[in-house]
Image (cartoon, grey):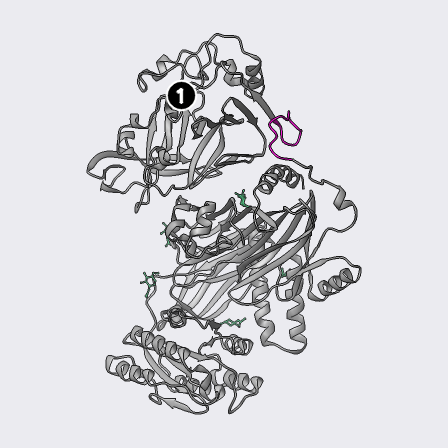
Amino acid sequence: MRRGVVQLSLFGVLVTLAAAQPKKDDWDIYSFHINSTVTGRYATTVMTSRVVNRMTESKEVEFHVQIPKNAFISKFTMLIDGQMYDGVVKTKEQAQQQYTQAVSRGQSAGIVSSVGRTMEEFKTSVTLAAHKKVTFELTYEELLKRTHGKYELQIHARPMQPVKDFKVDVHIHEKAGISFIDVKGGLSTNVLANAITKTRTDEQAWVHFYPTVDQQTTCDSCGERGLNGDLIVVYDVNRGNRLGDIKTLDGYFVHHFAPSDLPRIPKNVVFVIDRSGSMNGRKMQQTRTALIHILNDLAEDDFFGLLSFDSEISHWRRELVQAVSANLKGAKQFARGITDRGTTDINAAVLEGARMLNAHPREGSASILILLTDGDPTSGVTNHEAIQSNVRQAIAGKFPLYCLGFGFDVNFEFLEKMSLGNNGVARRIYEDSDADLQLKGFYEEVATPLLTDVTMIYVGGTNLTQTNFSQYYNGSEIVVAGEIIDNNVENFVPEVIAISSKQKVTFSNTNNSVDSSAGIADGLLQRVWAYLTVKQLLEKELLVSGPEKEKVKSNALELSLKYSFVTPLTSMVVTKPQGEDMDVLHKPKEGDGPRFDSYATPANRRVMLVRRPGQHGRVGLPGHPGSYGHLRPRNSPPSHDDREIRRWSSRSIDLSADYDDSNIYATNVAMAQPTETEMTTTPAPVSHRFLRKAENQPLPLCFDVSEAAIFKLLHHPSKELFVNGKLDSLTNGGFTKIVIHFSADQHIEVDPEGIRLHQGQTTTLYTGQDLITAGRLTVILRVKEIDVAVEDVRLVIFIHEKDGNKFLWPVLRQTPSADDTEGLLALKPADYQVRLQQSDGKLKLKDREAPAVRSSATDYSIANPVPMNCWLVGADFALERTLNDYFVAQL
Ligand SMILES: *[C@@H]1O[C@H](CO)[C@@H](O)[C@H](O)[C@H]1NC(C)=O
Ligand SMILES: *[C@@H]1O[C@H](CO)[C@@H](O)[C@H](O)[C@H]1NC(C)=O
Ligand SMILES: *[C@@H]1O[C@H](CO)[C@@H](O)[C@H](O)[C@H]1NC(C)=O
Ligand SMILES: *[C@@H]1O[C@H](CO)[C@@H](O)[C@H](O)[C@H]1NC(C)=O
Ligand SMILES: *[C@@H]1O[C@H](CO)[C@@H](O)[C@H](O)[C@H]1NC(C)=O
């Protein structure tokens, strides 16, 4: 609550600024953040949108986002005028009742409930009085599913407007180690690629996406309404232990089982293809294309069958045949000839497919039945229950049935019931240009069976999620969660028994792979357990009937309510502000902008300083920032202005008196002017270890700088942007001051205590959370982070602390598109080669070679710095030019 209030006052400033530039929208999204944290494949994503009504009358303001279908929404809040409105998860019936009551009382109330499809929409709105602001915050959770050997975290960004302060932050923590990480999706291409930054260690990875407003309107899938697309973070983890990854915490465990070093099991697969009239045109064509690809991918020791059906069945062969080239050739010919006609007899077709598999028992193989259909049964047996019962009898648990529902005319629930009742799953194939790839993609998921009859056993465990799986495929994963009886981890013995090819195999915990996980957020494994349990109960509910159905449903409902999951059984009720007092409280004052004449209000402690002409002003040549600094005669008494500054940053003043800068600059900067003096009298040796990221190599380079110096961080002459930073001997951490020149007579000075904006003769001091806009520059001050945007550059300056010293660390989040940039931050990842691999190595970068030793460094380019392994090399080598080239004379 308190935090909300602070944010509100902070953004109050922005709001007024935004209002000054008329736009055609009635309301402005001035900030949109997406923050995803993935721990042990469980992703928690928070979307925060801050909106203002710029009109002089009430307006309905919308929050409309998309979330992955697999996710459960677990939290929603609205913050309006410092007042928090929490969404409450209730049963569907209660929600409906409350909604009806609210409406009859003349109140507005919103209901949020989940709807099906790949992405789900979440939409709510609130009526905002004139000039009011609202913060929407939505949290959703999902267990990432492994398919095709990878996990995908899909983030859909469509804020509905270009947003100045738009960002996506993703943090992944996998104790098993991350084997690779990649960023895909429409938002990762072309112009937007510059907006993505990645950082990783063995166990952790960070992905940041900070597009500028320009990019949000000019990227491929973007328009006037800004971004519209996906950012997909793709990764996998290391799998050293065959039993997999078992985490325990607070009496719960989660087991990820995905061995890949097993031989493939030959398979017997029968494809049952719908060719009823509704498949005509593109669907039939895409099915033929996919089938031909799939046939091409069969291994020689696979057996297969192929039949197409409408009201009648056409076989290619009545029995399964081996996937040798002559047979495949004939089958492809048959596939090319499948044309649409007639009605749909699903019952007869599936039973015939089952018959073919049953007639072909083969030891040490895995049988799979795949049905592709686009419609409801319309001939033969059409009663759903009867078909289900027939099919279940014919299959008798011997192999899984996968149902692919093509397009939206299918009765998907019917297909789902049929699959789930026979150890399979149902998938939708979306009617689109890539339908053949979707079909092929699904087939690839089941193309390589590695185990059959998998039984997961947990002695000492209880309340387990599903433990029996008929088949396990390469690239997928089995996940089981449960409770540990009495939290007695010693007595907890996990084991997996399965059949690999012809023999029974046991995976047991020889290597003590149970990880009592520190470093996992409290209650996380319990949530994973709840998530999986609810998912599986919802599936089970489809299959059972009568009192058992009620019991399953009530269990699922109870858990959904307890963990606040919006599931098909629950809804979230968002009650909105009402009543007279809302209009009175926190009504924004007219002109609540950055008033340069104000002396500090408690909420945003802003102090304004006016520098009289002729007094320690900036000197130097405008447009050549490297050549000017702030001159203050060394022993002159502080002026009135300086006293103001001292209040803000006493340390820098106190230490200035006796400073002799010649020592420090002697080696680097021959013609150093006496600069603003913030150094200690006896400069301690500075040593900072910098990291340079690497391209195509696991380890970054690192190098030491042991001189106090002013660094050229980013010079971008075509945009008149110059960023310099001072590394000095006071701290052993990083920069103590960073200056950003963004026009001939405007710059900001950043230090860990705040920001000074210099515009001509005027200086304004900002501390605390605040927002600054000046010309092309936007700066948002947060608690430990300063976000700076200047046209196509987005920079984050972190305020880190080490041994009680605060220091700054700049990171480029948006690489400028022009190539006239230089400086430390403009360095591209190094493309080096390892010549000698041992603890002492030799690296080659471009055409230079240099010795290197394995070492470590702290990566300060993320909010919570982490140590990283690196190759320690000389600075000149790492930078590909002499270190002196990165120095400038003055800030
Ligand atoms: C993102 O969420 C995590 C976990 O809740 C939190 O620790 C972190 O500070 C958040 N990051 C941002 C940029 O808000
Ligand atoms: C046991 O664990 C260690 C380290 O975790 C690993 O190096 C080793 O390969 C594992 N051995 C087996 C048999 O899984
Ligand atoms: C399973 O997949 C891994 C890569 O994900 C691959 O190295 C391995 O060869 C595959 N196994 C089989 C039997 O295809
Ligand atoms: C299983 O979970 C339920 C509900 O969470 C709990 O009441 C019960 O005690 C648990 N069962 C066991 C055997 O721990
Ligand atoms: C799982 O499989 C084992 C052996 O294959 C069997 O004994 C057990 O009953 C099965 N459990 C469930 C819940 O189906």
Measuring from the top left, give residue 208's x and y in whole percent.
Answer: 45, 46
Measuring from the top left, give residue 825's x and y in whole percent.
Answer: 37, 35
* Residue sitting nearer the eye, 629 or 344: 629
Q: Is residue 49 above or below residue 638?
A: below
Q: Residue 581's quadrant in the figure?
A: top right
Q: Residue 499's quadrant in the figure?
A: bottom left
Q: What residue range appears in magenta?
A: 592-606
Q: Is residue 204 above or below residue 840?
A: below
Does residue 547 appear to the left or right of 627 in the view shown?
right
* Residue sitting nearer the eye, 719 or 45: 719
Measuring from the top left, give residue 118's x and y in whole percent.
Answer: 51, 65
Label count reads 1
- Residue underneath mark 1: 628
Q: Residue at x 40, y 17 (%)?
A: 684
Measuring from the top left, give residue 222's x and y in whole percent.
Answer: 46, 55
Label 1 sits on what residue type? Tyr
Is the residue marked 1 within 8 Å of ligand 1, measured from its CB? no
* Residue sitting nearer the eye, 371 or 161: 161
Magenta includes 598? yes
Magenta includes 834? no
Q: Quadrant of the N terminus?
A: top right
Q: Is residue 522 visible?
A: no
Q: Residue at x 45, y 73 (%)?
A: 431
* Residue sitting nearer the eye, 326 or 364: 326
- Please tell me whether the stretch drawn in magenta is mainly helix, strand or loop: loop
